[in-house]
Image (cartoon, helix red, strand yellow):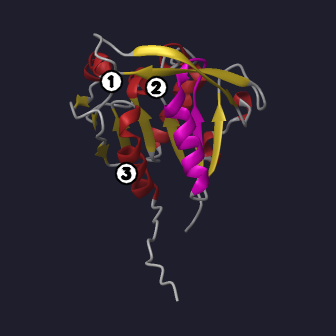
Amino acid sequence: MATKKILIIAGDYVEDYEIMVPFQALQMVGHTVHAVCPGKIAGQTIRTAIHDFEGDQTYSEKPGHNFTLNANFDEINPNDYDALIIPGGRAPEYIRLNEKVLQITQHFANNHKPIASICHGLQVLAAAGVLEGKRCTSYPACSPDILRAGGKYTEVSITEAVVDDNLVTAPAWPAQPNWLAEFLKVLGTKIEHREMVVV
């Protein structure tokens, strides 16, 4: 398996599971994963938030972990990376105001590299103007952003993912097993299961 170099762009109050799980799981299968935040460097932390679905009109929010970044945002060259992940939470609403974040996102879209985005992460893709004609999903409250950006918003179960060519999207963290599995396919990563015989 050829290993890939994957970039995650996030910010303070990113959703905890939506950064922690892919950051760890993709390294577990052998990929290199760099997590960055505008205005911060490797070794600094971002705060995360835990969003849950408890029967209210919208998700609830609780303090999460501090997540340690492992690369410097200002030194990122998107040419060095094979794929991009933009997790959700509250970070996307303001990191999309950063011009370099939009330029990096456009690089991955324009060069047909794999992109995964979950929950509110689609706000960044919409702001970058890379959703035109793309079938995708998000947290339902972000559907107007997708539609106004020319995307084809698709409502799916909270545990499901939507794939359109190089783009993998999901509505929220309960979809982690599905969107990660689909993202690995788009990356060309094959996990082989072998029956172990005990003698």
**Residue 140, image quadrant:** top left
Q: Amino acid at mark 2?
A: Gly
Which residue has dot 3 on it?
A: 182
Which of the two residues, 69 or 106, is positioned nearer the viewer here? 69
Q: Marks 1 and 2, how far apart in space?
A: 9 Å
Q: Residue furthest right?
A: 43
What residue range appears in magenta? 7-28
| Relative image position of residue 42 (x, y in whole percent) | 77, 32
Asked whether disc 1 touches disc 3, contact meaning CB atoms under 8 Å apart, the reply is no
Q: Residue at x 37, y 42 (%)?
A: 168
Q: Marks 2 and 3, how far apart in space?
A: 18 Å
Asked whether disc 1 touches disc 2, contact meaning CB atoms under 8 Å apart, the reply is yes
- For disc 1, the neighbor class at 10 Å (few under 14, some 14 to 19, many from 20) is many
Q: Amino acid at mark 1?
A: Tyr
Query: In the rendered view, does 15 fall on the left or right side of 47?
Result: left
Which residue has dot 1 on it?
A: 139
Q: Residue at x 30, y 23 (%)?
A: 146
Task: In the rendered view, tell whether residue 162 sits above or below residue 150.
Answer: below
Which residue has dot 2 on it?
A: 88
